[in-house]
Image (cartoon, helix red, strand yellow):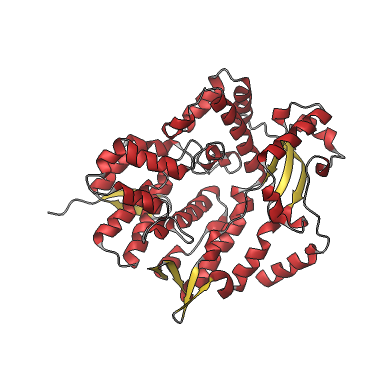
Amino acid sequence: MSEKKKFIRDSVYGDISLNNFEVKIMDMPQFQRLRRIKQLGLISLIYPGATHTRFEHCVGTMNLGSKLAEELELSKDEVELIRASAILHDIGHGPFSHVSEGVLSVPHEELSKYVITKTSMRDLLEEKFDVNKIVDIINGKGHLGPIVSGELDVDRMDYLLRDSHNTGVSYGIIDYERIISNLKLSDGLILDIKGVQAAEGALVSRYFMYPSVYQHHTTRIVNTMFRRALKKTIDDGIIEEREIYKYDDSDIIATFRHCENEYANDIMHRLDNRIIPKRVKTIRLDNFKFPEKMYKIKASELRKAEEEISEDYEIDKDYVFVNIAEYPRFDEMKTQVSVDGKLFPLTEISNIIGALSKARFNIPDISVYVAEEEKSKFEKFKLENYIDLPEIDREKFHGIHYDQIKLF
């Protein structure tokens, strides 16, 4: 007698079916913790609807992983392995997701490996799976790894759709069904030429979600404030970094509010009441001849600049923030496209993706933030007095806009 199917109602895909074993995985405390971790960290301070969780994202990733595995005509056992790997791929995420990861000495994939192989989760999983195969897939290794963690994977597809849905930013709407129906599994995921237009749409979506949501200037400062407070509480032994996979968002909030570290208390008060520092200087990286050089600036150099600025302008050094937007990776551009049996990089097949590759530095910037009441001191502020910046490119403006004309 076949088991009775169970369903979970998802805000993006509608009913998602689950087998009894997947329900057991979801009912484990390690997975239930993900209900209490926001997918987008502190972004609900900018987009109030962005309160969705890692729990939802993992279920959605499982749904897309299952669709893709079936499209690839994998065996029943492989489909179930992909579903389990997809639902567990973020099991080790720390509080506020990627926000806390910026402080930790290990990435969330390593923490996920620990939860899967060293906790009671392993005892359950080993009833049906080889946990090492799950860990490999989560890390993009082996034949099946690219489905969950690759260039054009189901993880990225789900978070674009879900983040767009919950923020109300329409850029993230992608034709995931068209992409999935045109993927083949060989040495990695290969996209058929018929799926290029949908892949272009996904890349353009990510390109615009980057400044609108993921690297919005307010997102960056609230993340930086949180990380600085988290680092201090870890350094003080208030929060145990090695056990961060046990914490959820509310644990960290309560700790910040009530611990003996006054800085963490104050930062939490500011986040609670949306008292957010203001930008006093912004330089877009496309102003430089070689914008990639900005990512060679060490964190220690930025910290030194903050200290020097604080001395010159008589501000507490912990309330001066120099921040560079995250590197715009867009790994999907590396996707291989099949044309008449031959493989070509997506950047060679698509003029749009080629233009995006060139335009990736149009958006990121380096910014300096201080408390609003200090802003008037910075009318004549020059960042180059504190950081050795790359050479400004006086000719690039015209080239960039030519590429954008081609793009649109």
Q: Quadrant of residue 248?
A: top left
Percent across and percent down for residue 175 are: 48, 65
Residue at 41% from the left image edge and 32% from the top image edge: 246
Residue 140 in which image quadrant:
bottom left
- Quadrant occupied by the N terminus: bottom left
How many discs mark residues in the rendered view?
0
Judging depth in this view, the residue of 224 and 291 nearest the camera is: 291
Q: Residue furthest bottom?
A: 340
The residue positioned farthest toward the top in the image shown: 260
Q: Is residue 23 above or below residue 240?
A: below
* Residue 39 pos. (x, y %): 49, 43
Report the quarter where the C terminus lies.
bottom right
Q: Is 300 placed above or below 325 here?
A: above
Q: Residue furthest left?
A: 1
Lateral position of residue 318 relative to residue 16, left or right: right
Position of residue 91 relative to residue 254, above or below, is below
Residue drawn at x 32%, y 35% is 119
Left or right: where does residue 266 sit relative to residue 36? Answer: right
Q: In this orientation, does residue 65 appear?
A: yes
Q: Is residue 91 visible?
A: no
Q: Position of residue 111 (x, y in %)?
A: 43, 40
- In this rendering, the answer to whether 325 lies above or below 342 is above
Is 313 left, or right, of 272 in this rendering? Answer: right
Where is residue 129? Give x, y as percent.
26, 49
The residue at the point 60 percent across, 68 percent down is 353
